[in-house]
Amino acid sequence: MAVLKLTGALHRPLRVLPALLLGMATAFASPAAPAGGAITPEAGTANSETQLAQALDRFVQALERSARTLKADPAFSGDRDSAAGVAYWAQMLIRTLEEDIVQDADFPFFREVDFRIREGGDNPDQRYLFSPLRGGAPYRIWGHKAGERRLEIQIYAGTPWTAQGGRVVAVLPEEALHVAPDGSFEVLLGGEPRAHNWLANPPDSSFVMVRQIYAEWPDTHGDVHIDRVGYEGRLKPGVGAQDMVRRIQRAAANFEELVPLWPTIGRERFAQQQPNTLSPLFDPTAAGGVEGRWMSLGAFELGQDEALILTMWPLGGNYQGVQLTDVWTSSLEYANRQTSLTAEQCYRSADGAYRYIIAHEDPGVQNWLDTTGLENGYLLLRYDGADRPEVPTSLWPGLTLTSFSQARAALPPETPDYSAAARQVAIAQRRRHVQLRFNR
């Protein structure tokens, strides 16, 4: 996921969630909670059931308000974009329920951003893992590397890409991660400093994010886990009424803030230049991005008979990728459509550049980025591990608009054809990797 200021497990169907919550609130037969502010039960009725019911009422109201916000968003227009908006709303709901109601900083498990939860330009090449932290407490992150090109760990205080803001307080990049010959690793957060595989966990820390980055989409995949040190073997207490009230209140507030966040960032940052152009390369670390990364952003706008030629030059790192998103900044379907590509998945031209055709139809070349029929959306380009203090303009990526019929001729003449049968194999391999990566 591109966590940039510059620029989401429920097993029930999504459609039942609002009805389920409404039914829960009605079952408590509570008076309607006032909009905004903390819950203050009436005199003589200050009991757990009343407070919980009021909190549920408040959450249902937040759902209703966020739905109105969604429908009023400029991106909520047309058949595909409005449908994608409803999917985005549901995905953010799953994310909010997991993060604000289910997760526990004392008995942590990682929350996963996968194909169910597509948020903020989430990278199809990455498995994102999030866990809340209790600032100042010691934690242990452990697992095995198997197939990842990179594994990055970052601790945050607050959230840099939201209105409330925040900062990155500690980073462990791939280059500094010590891994045993069998692929195992252990990283300590907080506690006594160590020379290797240690990150500070200051009192204002709020969460940790792990990125597993795959360049080749192999059949093998790594695993990452988290524990709070000193809590091993403890019995986890049940959630009391007051704690649940706080969780529901937090979820209501965060959900209302989250729904408009990413489409607004898309308009303000991804589309800050003219359509079918790219931003200059920039370093996203100041806004919470991963250390050692360069990025470029843009918006595509394509008619049915148009195509874009994207040229990317390697920058010397060990990962390079490009992807398309919709106008809600959610990744496009990436398991069963080729909407993203890494350098390892591409044909490289004789002059050293990677050239892609972005189009609605298959142009018969390996480096096709499939818009899935969307006429508008965003592009995200990432370069990781490039040890460059500056990038010369000659290596900046570029876009050229052309007709679809002329797109193939715009590539170097030695560019090989790519058959429909080869495309089927590539799509099948993509689906298999995603199934394995997310254990689905």
Image: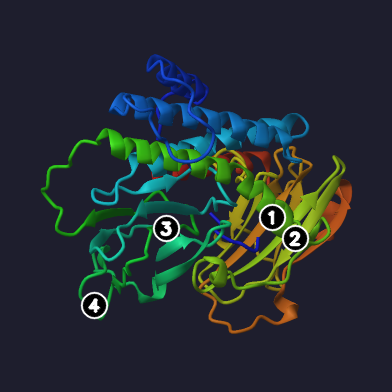
Q: How many other residues sit within 10 Å of disc 2, few (<14), some (14-19) or many (≥20)?
A: many
Q: Earlier in the sequence, mark 4 or mark 1?
A: 4
User: Which of labels 4 and 2 is toward the front?
Assistant: 4
Q: Residue furthest front?
A: 43
User: Which of labels 4 and 3 is toward the front?
Assistant: 4
**Amino acid type for the residue under numbered disc 3:** Gln
**Amino acid type for the residue under numbered disc 2:** Leu
- Horizontal side, residue 340 vs residue 23: left or right: right
Q: Is residue 9 above or below residue 295?
A: above
Q: Which residue in the protein does label 1 denote?
A: 379
Residue 310 got which mark? 2
Res 37 visible? yes
Residue in front for this viewpoint, 95 or 413: 95
Cβ–Cβ under 8 Å for marks 4 and 2: no
User: Which of labels 4 and 1 is toward the front?
Assistant: 4
Q: Earlier in the sequence, mark 3 or mark 1?
A: 3
User: CA–CA distance between discs 3 and 1?
Assistant: 21 Å
* Secondary element at tag 2: strand
Q: Residue at x 63, y 67 (%)?
A: 295
User: CA–CA distance between discs 4 and 2?
Assistant: 45 Å
User: CA–CA distance between discs 4 and 3?
Assistant: 24 Å
Q: Earlier in the sequence, mark 2 or mark 3?
A: 3
* Secondary element at tag 4: loop
Q: Position of residue 287 (x, y in %)?
A: 56, 67
User: CA–CA distance between discs 1 and 2?
Assistant: 10 Å
Cβ–Cβ under 8 Å for marks 1 and 2: yes
Q: Position of residue 342 (x, y in %)?
A: 57, 58
> Residue 175's quadrant in the figure?
bottom left
Q: Earlier in the sequence, mark 1 or mark 2?
A: 2
Screen quadrant of the C terminus: top left
Q: Which residue in the protein does label 3 denote?
A: 212
